[in-house]
Amino acid sequence: MNMYKYLLALVLGLSMVGCSDLEENALSELEPDERVVDLQTVQTTIAGAYANLTARAFLSRGLGLPLMLRSDMVAIGNPTTAAERIEHDQFTVSATNPLILNPSNPERSFWPRLYQMVRGANETLREVAVLEEQSPGVSEEIAGRARFIRAYAYYHLVRLFGDIPYLDEKISTAEASVAPRTPVETVYENIIADFEYAKEWLPDSRANRALPGKAAASAFLASVYLTRGEYQLAYNEATDIINKAGTYNLALEPDYRNIFHAENTNFSLEPIFVIDFVATNIDDESRDYLAAFTGFYGQATYYPSGGWSVLVPAQKVYDTWEDGDYRKDVCFDDEALDNSGNLIPFTAFSSLDGRNANRPHISKYTAMAGSLPQANTSGRDSESNYQLMRYAEVLLIAAEAAAELGNTAEADQWINMIRERARNGDGTGAPSAVPANISGATVDDVLEERRLELAFEHKRWYDIVRRKMGNEVFGPNGFEAELGTRNFDPSRDYLLPIPPLEITNNPNLTQNSGY
């Protein structure tokens, strides 16, 4: 995966306007059958597609900010932060929100970045078709990687925007520029087909989990089925992974903290698919920003320069989390060292800098940034691995599907495996009594376990959307009620706006309701 960061410069050299311009200048102005295509060419193209995962426009900043802030787990801490972020926190998003598409800097926006993944995958598949004619039998695994990243990008796009233009390797430049919005159902059919192909042709496991194997394709298939409410299919897919854990080389990591430790996570069997940052400031487009956004000014617990106090949990998120649950200790900083070595409680974080919120901050990203000197720039030059899919989530997918199907004993079993790990802490002391085992798990119980186990890992907003929980979680009894009114409108806010520039460029595009 490390090579992908250096290929990001190649990706950024491509046209970055949006889906209407996707097919132009994809790697050259020539189609694959008009130029030399060999195995190295194809490997470079697919590496360029995956390089988008480490871009600041994706989860480390551009898309990561909305996914965090639109959940009920995280709110704005620093009130002086950019308005484009506050809009997502308050559900006042304008159609021209630059995190979605900034015409002046499209490479820093997530709509074009997700379509860059699609374009790289499509270009790979076109090249693979040429390569297969020259060297039959060498292309299926590469095609599997291409179809995996295409499905992964579309899985984000369809959940964020609903109907979207679906472009595959057969779409020409002219067709792409006027492509209409494809119905959600059709998009999902294509996503499922891509993940199924990837599951067939990718290897059982990989030492480097920044590349997908069969388990990654299968796990995302299970997630797609869960999102669609196809619970038997989700159950079948997730339990197949559980039954093949040995084949796929998967297991729960004994120490929850190691999953988010920059070095130790590389030796864990829990990660299934990750983003691998490589501790270099080669360019600002491929830096890890979540450490900075979740850290706070003036603290030196991990590195001297601290962070920016932007993504901060509501106080109630911390207060309602049971003490004794090891995951709470891993997820939060409720005290910090200043640069003089003084221990500061969270109630006085603003004494370090007035922009800090006096609430416990997220430590999953600050603590795991790594110990190399390069990580000392607010954690942005880190060795972090973002967990895009891990084995615990597979267990929770299986548990939720089982609860929906009435198999409560199985749901209990998988939840309790995760809770036992939380009780055992780092394994050096007596187990905690918290969280206690569950019996008779309901769907609500599983959703609550997901909220805690997968806290701050970009999952909660998608859970709120698929379960249509917005009115409940952003209402007067929600975690963020103490921070003021959230302007959540269920007729509008489950989807984001289609960028107006795309509608201007493409007469066949329409806008989502409410924008």
Image (cartoon, rainbow, N blue to C red):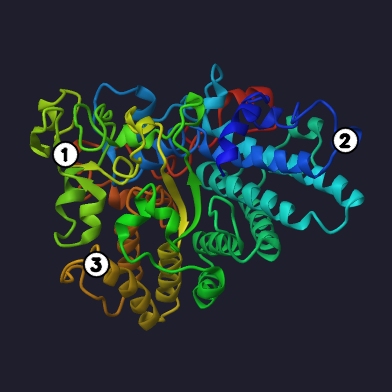
Amino acid carrying mark 3 in the image? Gly
- Numbered disc in front, either 3 or 2: 3
Quarter where residue 107 is shown = top right
**In terms of image quadrants, where is residue 52?**
top right
Task: Determine the CA span between mark 3 and mark 1.
Answer: 29 Å
Position of residue 384 measured from the top left corner of the image (x, y, whole percent): 41, 43
Q: Which residue is mark 1?
A: 359
Residue at the disc numbered 3: 427
The residue lying toward the viewer, choosing from 468 and 278, is 278
Q: Locate residue 467 relative to residue 205 in the image: left or right.
A: left
Whether residue 469 appears in this view of the structure is no
The location of residue 198, given as percent across then percent down, is: 67, 59
Figure quadrant of the N terminus: top right
Q: Is 134 located above or below residue 37 in the figure? A: below
Tag 1 or tag 3, which sits nearer the N-term? 1
The residue located at (25%, 58%) in the rendering is 327
**Dot 3: element:** loop
Q: Which mark is residue 36?
A: 2
* Residue 254 screen position, x and y as percent: 33, 66
Image position of 244 (left or right of 350) = right
**Looking at the image, which is closer to me, 114 or 343?**
343
Q: Distance of mark 3 from mark 2, alpha carbons?
A: 56 Å
Q: Is residue 155 visible?
A: yes
Q: Which amino acid, by three-letter code, is at mark 1?
A: Arg
> Closer to the N terminus: mark 3 or mark 2?
2
Crowd around label 1: few <14 · some 14–19 · many ≥20 (10 Å): many
